Image (cartoon, helix red, strand yellow):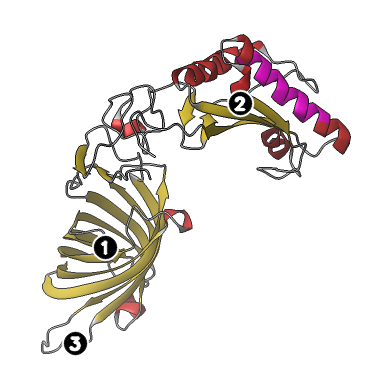
Amino acid sequence: MLRKCLCVLVIFSPAIANATDVSVKVEPGVAVPLTTPQSQLFDTGGTESVKVLFGLNRYLDIGPATSFTLLPGSKAGVESGTAWAFGGGLRLKRPHDAISAYGISPWLDADFFYIRTGDLNRPGFDVGIGASIPIGETRTFWIGPFIRYMQIIQIDRDAFDNHDSKTLIFGVSFEVGTGIERKAPDVRTVVETRVVTEHCPDRDNDGLPDHVDHCPDIAGPIDNWGCPAYQKVIVHANKLELKEKIQFAWNTPKLEEVSFPLLDEVAQVLKDNPNFRVEVEGHASAEGADDHNQTLSEQRASAVLEYLAAHGVAKERLGSKGFSSSVPIDTNATSAGRESNRRVEFVVTLNIVNAPGASK
């Protein structure tokens, strides 16, 4: 009976707190007076607001705001109306690092103001709703439509109309901010924890036990699952993933010279890992007759096998098989999809090797 080995390996990258998100938002818009006497005295005008927003968390921003509104007089002798607003508020938004729905961020905000109109100083507020669409992968720039309701609160005064001024504003917002990091987390800095009840075999002494190590016979960094940093090949537990496509002459199994460096690296991976057995799979698109595609996919898989054997990989470690067009990875309805389906894949089979000294 084999002795059991329990190894617990924990690899993580410390969470890095993002610096406070800061953005500047500019909102040019059209202002429509809704109530008398403003709607009788003034025509539709324009407005401009600027906000500085500081992220409290992924959902909530807060910061100062200012705006200027100009309503042209609708009658001869009526001067244009202006309103300067200074204050601040908050915004509730969909997180700017959201992935689905193209990253679109609906938002709802509210501001409270000190407003100067002519010789009068009055309080006021606004409420807005809109959506921001990211421009670029870093999501530094955003653009989107909005609609806003503004109300200036009129304090009772004798001989004056004491109704509140209400205005509807709509336009397009422009925002620039710190953006978000779109790269995968940096796992080069890792913390490793082991709990060992009995000896865990580690043939290449790279710190990863053999049952976790994707390359147990050659040392490699922990963050690459114990494999060297190959340039064109990624070693998985059950597959060799090629970063480039193997190229063949049109409608033949002849390898193009441009693919020789890629296959040379595949051969090196197999030399570095003598316990790998590899089955080379050839696939074709759905063009042409099935028997021709089957033969071509088998011949191309065999051509790759012969190349590896000629470059130092023992033939008993290699196998090949053609699948014609039976296993597509993309649609055959487009030329790009058919090109993707013409491929050669490597499936890795690992020999089971008893650890030295293991008892049965």
Image coords of residue 110 (percent x, y): 24, 70
What amino acid type is highlighted by mark number 2? Lys
Query: Which secondary structure, mark 2?
Result: loop
How far apart marks 3 and 2 lie (CA) works out to: 75 Å
Residue placed most toward the observer, 251 or 239: 239
Q: Is residue 136 left or right of residue 114?
A: right
What amino acid type is highlighted by mark number 3? Asn
State the extent of the magenta-drawn residues as a range: 295-308
Residue denoted by label 1:
59
10 Å neighbourhood of mark 3: few (<14), some, or many (≥20)? few
Q: Quadrant of the C terminus?
A: top left
10 Å neighbourhood of mark 2: few (<14), some, or many (≥20)? some
Image coords of residue 162 (percent x, y): 19, 87
Q: Is residue 282 left or right of residue 357?
A: right
> Where 20 falls versus 214 (above or below)?
below
Who comes first in sequence, dot 2 or dot 1? Answer: 1
**Magenta segment, prevailing SS (helix, strand or loop):** helix
Residue 108 appears in the rendering: yes
Front position among marks 2 and 1:
2
How far apart marks 3 and 1 lie (CA) works out to: 38 Å
Front position among marks 3 and 1:
1
Front position among marks 3 and 2:
2
Q: Do the numbered discs 3 and 2 sit on residues whose CB atoms are within 8 Å?
A: no
> Where 120 falls versus 106 (above or below)?
below
Residue 42 appears in the rendering: no
Labelled disc at residue 162: 3
> Where 76 falls versus 216 (above or below)?
below
Query: Which secondary structure, mark 1?
Result: loop
Residue denoted by label 2:
245
